[in-house]
Image (cartoon, rainbow, N blue to C red):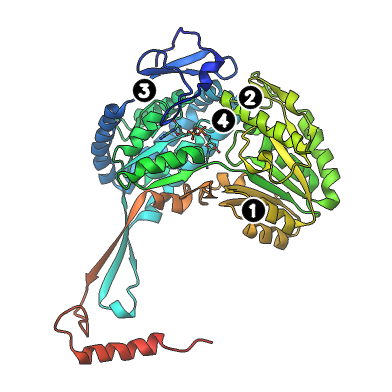
């Protein structure tokens, strides 16, 4: 890693869109490289190569060889190496957290928490891959009684992982570790905002698995991601915006490369009249403001039962006013990592106010680059950008509703469907609301807890994407199901032969009528 002496302004982090592959948000430091900057200070951190199509192809070719070696290891041998990686990351957590802090600006304790969550998934994937994916006998059914049936899950080969910057450890490892545990090699393209974190992860894996390049790094801007999507890898696990997901999908279509899309969200928290309002306010503030609101499963909309609306709003305001963004150790959250996002936040606040909304806390004055102070918006029309689009800043809209049903209806009137949260004491009502919320994941009486349960799948619906990471579903995403039947004895009637007679057909039709022809009322 080469530290550059060049001074780069904050503006360089937010170059306008120029390339067909997406916004060129980094000016190359010299031909074929780009700088990564500290978002709080705009100081350059390091310079990284921009991988072109040939470099990506060569990396994928090396990954193919590594995949053959990795997939030939036993479950136990892979598990041992993955657990060694987990232990390495845990032991050096402070170094990695410092790197995350440098590149994203998030407070070090938040970075540690993020890494700990990733470690939980490393542990689970390593320990459960065999159980979930090992070959198993399945029942053949009456029609195929003479067959022994086996279901197996084989590795795909090479998986390309394209990551975002907001959780540069937790998010990509959610794909990387499940893909590795399923027996694949991985080529990882981290966000151009967090390549040093990506490099740290790849180097730490190589430190414990030195034999073959099972996990490799390719760095660059969007175009490098596009090369990876076109490189003929066996699957792309993409995390980022829905806008980019569409481009990745188009690139993947060229080779019929399957993909997972983990995209943005506009998550709601709904508060019932019987909810514990202190707990709900506390969770809402964390869900909306931590990481400067730059969380895909962060809370952006709150719907509160009319009867408790004012009390809840007071509790929210109390908690929010004491929050302070900054770069020092006492700061509650950091700067906006991607300067371009500040414009989006500003636009959403301005739109909301112009449409008749009120700022209960903060407002346009909360924007002091590169920081955005906490903002609570009320009375915002449901069709305004602040309610409909992903804001990705420390803001929330708070809206009074008649009851949980109305809250769910408004929460569901969104093109996104990633996470959601319900606060209610009545367990039955809470479960009913959780089921009715059209999102991939819901927490009851807490926020984003589902992300910390490794046996649960993670992913969204609609514009929030498709496919699942984490848990057994996450392991199966990176495997191909293989069906095998072995004939154990000759069938009493051979239906798949030209020697089949009319009498054979008659027998089978009689049996079929008995088994399946019964009337149902
Ligand atoms: P982004 O879409 O700008 O970039 C994501 C990645 O895609 C980066 O590595 C980028 O270099 C790459 N990329 C850009 N153009 C590409 C192209 N044409 N082909 C291939 N790759 C390309 O997103 P971002 O700003 O890095 O991340 C923020 C977004 O990610 C938000 O919308 C957030 O909600 C979402 N996110 C979702 C999850 C989830 O699990 N659902 C997790 C974290 C972040």
Left or right? Give the position of 214 relative to 415: left
Q: Are discs 3 and 1 less than 8 Å apart at CB?
A: no
Q: Residues within 10 Å of mark 4 (few under 14, many from 20)?
A: many
Helix, strand or loop at disc 4?
Answer: helix
**Residue 198 vertical position relative to residue 249 in the rendered view, above or below:** above
Mark 4 or 3, closer to the camera: 3
Q: Earlier in the sequence, mark 2 or mark 1?
A: 2
Classify the position of the N terminus by image quarter. top left
Q: Earlier in the sequence, mark 4 or mark 2?
A: 4
Mark 2 or 1, closer to the camera: 1
Q: CA distance from mark 2 to mark 1?
A: 30 Å
Query: In front: 242, or 184?
Result: 242
- The dot on residue 412 is 1
From this viewpoint, which residue is outermost toward the left?
Answer: 499
Q: CA distance from mark 3 to mark 2?
A: 28 Å
Q: Earlier in the sequence, mark 3 or mark 1?
A: 3
| Residue bearing mark 4 | 112
| Residue bearing mark 2 | 334
Helix, strand or loop at disc 3?
Answer: loop
| Residue bearing mark 3 | 50
Left or right? Give the position of 313 relative to 187: right
Task: Return the x and y of residue 253 as percentages of the image width and height.
Answer: 34, 45
């Amino acid at each position: 890693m080469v530290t550059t002496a060049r001074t780069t302004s904050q503006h360089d982090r937010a170059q306008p869109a120029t390339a067909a592959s997406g916004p060129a948000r980094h000016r190359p430091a010299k031909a074929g490289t780009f700088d990564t900057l500290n978002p709080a200070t705009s100081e350059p951190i390091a310079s990284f190569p921009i991988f072109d199509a040939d470099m990506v192809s060569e990396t994928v070719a090396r990954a193919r060889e590594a995949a053959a070696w990795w997939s030939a290891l036993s479950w136990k041998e892979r598990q041992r190496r993955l657990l060694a990686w987990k232990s390495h990351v845990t032991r050096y957590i402070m170094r990695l957290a410092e790197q995350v802090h440098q590149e994203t600006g998030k407070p070090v304790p938040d970075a540690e928490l993020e890494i700990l969550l990733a470690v939980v998934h490393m542990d689970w994937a390593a320990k459960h891959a065999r159980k979930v994916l090992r070959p198993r006998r399945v029942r053949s059914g009456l029609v195929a009684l003479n067959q022994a049936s086996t279901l197996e899950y084989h590795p795909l080969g090479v998986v390309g992982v394209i990551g975002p910057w907001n959780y540069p450890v937790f998010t990509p490892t959610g794909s990387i570790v499940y893909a590795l545990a399923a027996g694949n090699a991985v080529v990882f393209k981290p966000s151009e905002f967090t390549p040093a974190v990506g490099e740290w992860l790849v180097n730490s894996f190589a430190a414990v698995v030195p034999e073959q390049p099972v996990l490799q790094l390719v760095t660059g801007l969007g175009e490098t991601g596009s090369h990876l999507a076109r490189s003929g890898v066996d699957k792309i696990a993409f995390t980022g915006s829905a806008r980019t997901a569409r481009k990745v999908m188009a690139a993947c279509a060229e080779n019929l490369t399957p993909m997972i899309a983990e995209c943005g969200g506009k998550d709601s928290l709904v508060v019932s009249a019987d909810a514990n309002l202190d707990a709900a306010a506390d969770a809402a503030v964390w869900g909306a403001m931590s990481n400067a609101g730059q969380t895909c499963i962060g809370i952006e909309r709150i719907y509160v039962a009319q009867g408790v609306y004012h009390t809840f709003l007071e509790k929210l305001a109390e908690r929010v006013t004491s929050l302070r963004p900054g770069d020092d150790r006492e700061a509650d959250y950091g700067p906006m990592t991607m300067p371009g996002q500040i414009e989006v936040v500003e636009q959403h606040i301005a739109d909301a106010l112009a449409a008749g909304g009120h700022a209960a806390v903060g407002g346009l004055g909360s924007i002091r680059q590169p920081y955005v102070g906490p903002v609570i918006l009320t009375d915002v029309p449901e069709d305004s950008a602040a309610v409909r689009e992903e804001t990705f800043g420390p803001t929330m809209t708070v809206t009074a509703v008649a009851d949980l049903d109305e809250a769910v209806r408004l929460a569901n009137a969104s093109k996104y469907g990633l996470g959601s949260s319900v606060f209610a004491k009545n367990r039955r009502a809470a479960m009913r609301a959780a089921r009715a919320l059209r999102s991939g994941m819901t927490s009851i009486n807490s926020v984003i807890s589902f992300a910390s349960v490794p046996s649960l799948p993670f992913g969204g619906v609609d514009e929030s994407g498709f496919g699942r990471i984490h848990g057994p579903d996450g392991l199966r995403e990176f495997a191909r199901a293989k069906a095998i039947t072995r004939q154990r004895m000759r069938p009493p009637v051979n239906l798949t032969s030209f020697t089949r007679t009319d009498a054979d057909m008659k027998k089978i039709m009689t049996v079929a009528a008995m088994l399946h022809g019964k009337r149902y009322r």
